[in-house]
Image (spheres, grey):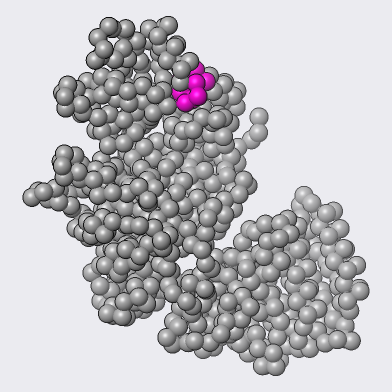
Amino acid sequence: MEKLNPLDQKINTHFPGLVVRKDLVKAVKGNAIVPSYVLEYLLGQYCATSDEPTIQTGIETVKEILRKHYVHRNEAGLVRSNIKEKGRYKVIDKISVALNEKTDAYEAEFSNLGIKKVLVDSDTVKAHPKLLVSGVWCICDIEYQFTEDKNSTPWVLSTLKPIQLSHFDFEAYLEARRKFSLDEWIDLLVQSMGFNPEMFGRRSKLIQLIRLIPFCERNYNLIELGPKGTGKSHIFSEFSPHGILISGGEVTVPKLFVNNSTGKIGLVGYWDVVAFDEFAGKQKRVDKALVDILKNYMANKSFSRGIETLGAEASMVFVGNTRHAVPYMLKHSDLFEELPEKFYDSAFLDRLHFYIPGWEVDIIRNEMFSDGYGFVVDYLAEILRSLRDHDFSDRYKDHFTLSSDISTRDRDGIHKTFSGLMKILFPQGGATSEEVEELLGFAMEGRKRVKDQLMRLDSTYADVAFHYSDNDGKDKVVTTLEEVEYPHHYHRTIAEAEPDVAGMPTQAGERAGASEETPAVTEKGEEPKEGHLTFSENQKGVSYDMLFGPYLRGAGRITVTDPYIRLFYQVRNFMEFVETVVRYKESGEEVAIQLVTTEDDFKGDQQRDNLDKIKAACEAVGIEFEWEFDQSRSIHARHIVTDTGWKISLDRGLDIFQHYEMNEAFAFANRMQQFRPCKAFEVTYLKQN
């Protein structure tokens, strides 16, 4: 049996019976068109263990249950026959219930089984009111009792059990949370969402977790716009029995809020989260009345039914695809440009608490899915639902103070996002000042992204400085990542300069959002200067040419000290550094490059072979390359030193890029560094005597 990694061992130790291996969903799904939480509910019954033989037996049991009891539409006739012949049969299907006013009885409709007018008793409907507004996945026992009465149905609903957790121990959850570090807890949550945390940086993990906030925060208004295929809608259709995903084109006032002719309450009265899929599209027809009532609900948490005003707690989520790259949108319009015309309305947009930058989320690939352990999703869904009763929005106030410039509506957005993140990551409390600051800054950035775009499309909005101060009175300004990357377009009324080939400004200091001390490193003929650069996670537009090129010009000898030139991708990074040296050296001159690194414990032979291949390649282009292993294994510093007196200190060495498709020949990120998202890193340039 394969040995579990330390995190998976810890997860199984502290949450026994409540976690499942995430790759099992694919193993059992087959051609069953059911949400993940339905499958994980079954897996949680039979496979919530780390014991491999039990898992394998459980998988077969779940497959057998699905084979026997899940209703495929094309086999509905066979299942109906089974019910008739056996008299009673268990099925897994999506069920909705309606009141028949003529008979004064509740009647169920089975989505896949294709039967209607199945009588349901009032107690069942009272216990599970969501049956009345949309389909709910259930495990049911159905009986067949033939009758000659043409007005009655032979189908009888014997038992009905919605697929969701019936109870949980919240105090035990908090106690177990205390056993995990923040990094471990984040990785556990990311694995619970089905993703491999090793494929994500810290910022990217937090972006994924933002998608959970609507489930734990009442009346939270979230939007995510970005490229296709990034999993924007998955979490709202597959993750929780308390959320519903509806097509943006199918939304009507009666369906969403209230049917005035019948008085029947719509989706917001019954669901914790209502998500609008395919929300973008300029040409989509939208009912103006829907926009107006939606604006009122998002602001006041209420809507009208005739003369009666009703409150509701449903969070609203809007997800849609963008057609253009971020610099194009910033140069020609704004980040809301894809919305339907009636929703392209400042009063509506101002009610959004957070804008997830969907362009920062990777296209979903197979290797991004986890085979580690995570919570059975219906367990996590119930935990998040119970957290809706709590308010963590003031938990930063012992450490930080928001600027008085920030308006009430901006403050509400920041507070709700911060509260949601604190509930998800620190339900037990105990966050340090640094941990609180990270979440506060992230919450402010998401609201600032909304506000900055509002100021583009409505000049009546006052300019707001999003900043906060610590207990020492030190003021800290929050910026969005795209503001750092594309200042020429982001603040286009201030700077209208043409971008370079990557859509980036020409000065490295402008790219990094750094101070006046930042060196200018991209203009040919300009003297490089001492300084310090800081880059944010997921920032693009960064390359070795930009960072190092001018500092390497004229050098006859370059020494690179980096203990982590071991694995293939790290050696490839070094090869790309050598390419930069080749581009910046004078024609007809030779440059000596010395690499000092450490030997890989497991793949030393392959490491040597790769470095020797670089050495052989260098001989043909005027580079004399030598490398050596530091036998003491004591080197920790990572820097580049030239014989022209420059020392470039790198806190991450050359390993500044996040994972990208290295084997995809036709991906720009593979061929051009400036299209790769970065890890967070810093560079210092020093001139030595």
Q: Residue at x 42, y 6 (%)?
A: 85
* Whole-percent x, y for residue 309 in the image: 12, 50
Residue nearest the observer in this picture, 117 or 566: 117
For this view, does 218 lie left or right of residue 307? right
Q: Residue at x 47, y 76 (%)?
A: 332
Work out whether 425 lies above or below 34.
below
Residue nearest the observer in this picture, 21 or 363: 363
For this view, does 484 lie left or right of residue 408? right
* Whole-percent x, y for residue 202 in the image: 51, 59
When asked about the image quadrant of residue 271, the answer is top left
Magenta segment, principal secondary structure? helix
Q: Residue at x 46, y 17 (%)?
A: 77
Residue nearest the observer in this picture, 278 or 395: 278
Q: Quadrant of the N terminus?
A: top right
When asked about the image quadrant of residue 148, the answer is top left
Q: Quadrant of the C terminus?
A: bottom right
Work out whether 41 lies above or below 407.
above
Residue nearest the observer in this picture, 222 or 164: 222
* Residue extent of the magenta highlight: 67-75
* Whole-percent x, y for residue 407 in the image: 25, 72
Residue 71 shown in magenta:
yes
For this view, does 124 lie left or right of residue 355? left
Residue 70 in view: no
In this view, which residue lies farthest toward the front?
150
Residue 239 in view: yes
Q: Residue at x 29, y 25 (%)?
A: 108
* Whole-percent x, y for residue 68 in the image: 49, 17
Residue 77 shown in magenta:
no
In this view, which residue lies farthest toward the left?
307
